[in-house]
Image (cartoon, rainbow, N blue to C red):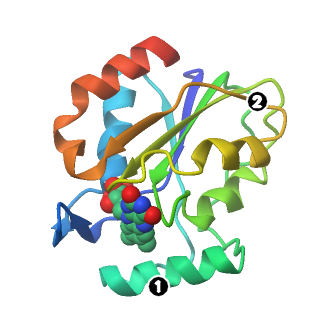
């Protein structure tokens, strides 16, 4: 078993990239997670909500905003229950209204992070890491929060080298 774990969320389909709506065959975060796994090896856990968000980009942004306002913890299709075999855990996801999608917190709140090193990774269209570091500090009790990485979603297809260098520095 790899000692690296990546817990990630990524949404395929309609997204807003560089000022226009496009259809992504693979989500931006999913691409970036693949670069890390290739560079240093990692087990992956994908957060998938039981109820999918709207395919329409604008409708999805409204659903995400409502969830955030109500501190929702949406049900997931599968849950990870044990992270005792991992030293370093990367939490990767898109920036949604300044933080991770609520389903990421559904999962994180079920885990014991005592003694773990947690690395924030966010893809975004301008907000960088947003509130990721603060929110992970609050949520991953017992964890030491390591250096984060923010990747512009629109640059994700070309970010392999940058992401691999970050992964080799912090996760190898
Ligand atoms: C619901 C929603 C909310 C978003 N909110 C923000 C935001 O607050 N700041 C930002 O920089 N980008 C925001 N974005 C853009 C995404 O963070 C960006 O496109 C990301 O790379 C998508 O990753 P994914 O393809 O892995 O889901 C938002 C996108 C969606 C769908």
- Residue 86 quadrant: top right
Quickly name the residue at label 2. 84
**Above-or-below relation of 128 to 158:** below
Q: CA distance from mark 2 to mark 1?
A: 36 Å
Is any atom of residue 17 visible in this view?
yes
**Above-or-below relation of 171 to 5:** above
Foreground of the two, 146 or 40: 146
Foreground of the two, 123 or 28: 123
Q: Which quadrant of the figure shows ligand 1?
A: bottom left
Foreground of the two, 169 or 82: 169
Q: SS of the residue at dot 1?
A: helix
User: Percent x, y for residue 125?
Assistant: 32, 56
Quickly name the residue at label 1. 62
Query: Which label was assigned to residue 148?
Result: none
- Residue 40 quadrant: top left
Residue at 16 percent across and 70 percent down: it is: 22
Disc nearest the viewer among 2 and 1: 1
Quadrant of the image containing the N terminus: top right
User: Percent x, y for residue 4?
Assistant: 56, 25
């Amino acid at each position: 078993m790899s000692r690296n774990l990546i817990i990630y969320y990524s949404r395929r389909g309609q997204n807003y990239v560089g000022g226009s709506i496009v259809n992504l065959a693979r989500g931006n975060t999913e691409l970036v997670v693949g670069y890390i796994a290739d560079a240093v090896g990692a087990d992956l856990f994908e957060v998938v909500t039981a109820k999918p968000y709207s395919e329409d980009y604008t409708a999805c942004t409204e659903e995400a905003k409502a969830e955030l306002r109500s501190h929702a913890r949406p049900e997931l299709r599968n849950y990870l229950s044990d992270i005792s075999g991992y030293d370093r855990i990367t939490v990767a996801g898109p920036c949604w209204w300044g933080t991770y999608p609520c389903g990421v917190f559904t999962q994180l709140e079920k885990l014991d992070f005592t003694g773990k090193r947690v690395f924030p990774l966010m893809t975004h269209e301008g907000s960088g890491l947003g509130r990721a570091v603060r929110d992970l500090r609050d949520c991953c009790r017992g964890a030491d929060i390591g250096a984060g990485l923010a990747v512009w979603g629109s640059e994700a297809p070309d970010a392999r080298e940058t992401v691999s260098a970050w992964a080799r520095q912090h996760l190898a």
